[in-house]
Image (tube, rainbow, N blue to C red):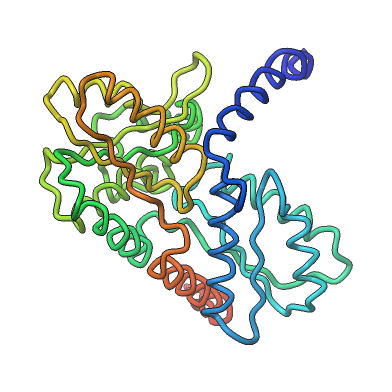
Amino acid sequence: MRWLVLESAILPVRSRRSAALYRSIWDDNVGSPLLHHTRNLAESVDESLGAGWVVRGAMRYGEPSIQSAWESLRASHVRQIVVVPLYPQETSSTIGSVLDEIHRQASQDWVPTPMSVVPRFYDNAQFIEAWRTVASETLAVANADHVLFSFHSIPQRHITKADDTRAHCLVTEGCCELKDSPISAGCYRAQCVRTANQLAGELDLSEDAWSISFQSRLGRIPWVQPYTDVELDRLRAQGVRRLAVMCPAFVCDNLETVEEIGIRARRQWLNAGGHELILVPSLNAHPSWVEAVVGLVKGQVAASNNPEPVDTH
């Protein structure tokens, strides 16, 4: 029944809608922003790492696929593979899905290749510094009254299911602010809050000069809040005129940043009487982000080749 509804009603409508949205941001010379920036990032990281390294970019859904990238690496006779899921914060639908597919590909190899994975990096110092560098360039000339950190949302049930106690996530007031909580450490929303807090500190934003929201919700079920479109209305009602929006759940500009924020959210803001909505570009292939990715890769190689001793006492 679920397959029938998906194939007959949801996908045909969603495909047509998505195609129209992609046409609004498509570049005939480079294609989609996500593919363009991912290619540039892979090439820049490859060049920075130098001889002895092979770098391939891949899409979880799309081309180049994880399968084609994996086969290319195997054909290059690499001795060790480092996987870098380009999602700063962790969810089962992002990093989890990527790792499921990579392990599926690896399981088909007759001779396994040693593999390690760069863990979530939502609070990694180099990641935060890269965002600070990129954002500072835009904010220096934006003259914004307020900075909104808009993260990709997920259904609330994904958050509550990850809390085995059922007494913490979205139940305890300020649950995402508890830094020492092992439950918060694995919570997507808490990771987003931590990223935003660190960026606000690095950008020297006062407490009332920034806020957090979550975008891209679908359907009628509750998603992680506050919703970005609702937050836009709230900020306008408070008198904010020039708004800068950063999307630190993404490391490359894509449909959710360029179209959803840069076009739709800007239209909503201007229609509500706002003066300007400035989309802060993502990290893309900025030199500071290339340097950060190289650091993440080399750090993971060092950690996997020299694991910490296990305390057996």
The N terminus - image quarter: top right
> Residue 62's image quarter?
top right
Q: Is residue 274 left or right of residue 66?
A: left
User: Hey, which residue is sitting farthest bottom in the picture?
Assistant: 51
Q: Where does the image place residue 125, in percent across and percent down from the top left?
A: 33, 65
Q: Where does the image place residue 243, in percent across and percent down from the top left?
A: 22, 36
Along the line of sight, which residue is nearer the eye, 154 or 35?
Answer: 35
Residue at image location 29% in from the left, 63% down from the top: 133
Residue at image location 66% in from the left, 47% down from the top: 60
Q: Where does the image place residue 282, in percent across and percent down from the top left?
A: 40, 52
Residue at image location 57% in from the left, 57% down from the top: 38
Q: Is residue 274 left or right of residue 77?
A: left
Residue at image location 62% in from the left, 69% down from the top: 82
Q: Quick check: 85 above or below 276?
A: below
Q: Quick check: 117 above or below 260?
A: below
Q: Where does the image place residue 161, in percent across and percent down from the top left?
A: 50, 31
> Residue 72's image quarter?
bottom right
Along the line of sight, which residue is nearer the eye, 172 or 217?
Answer: 217
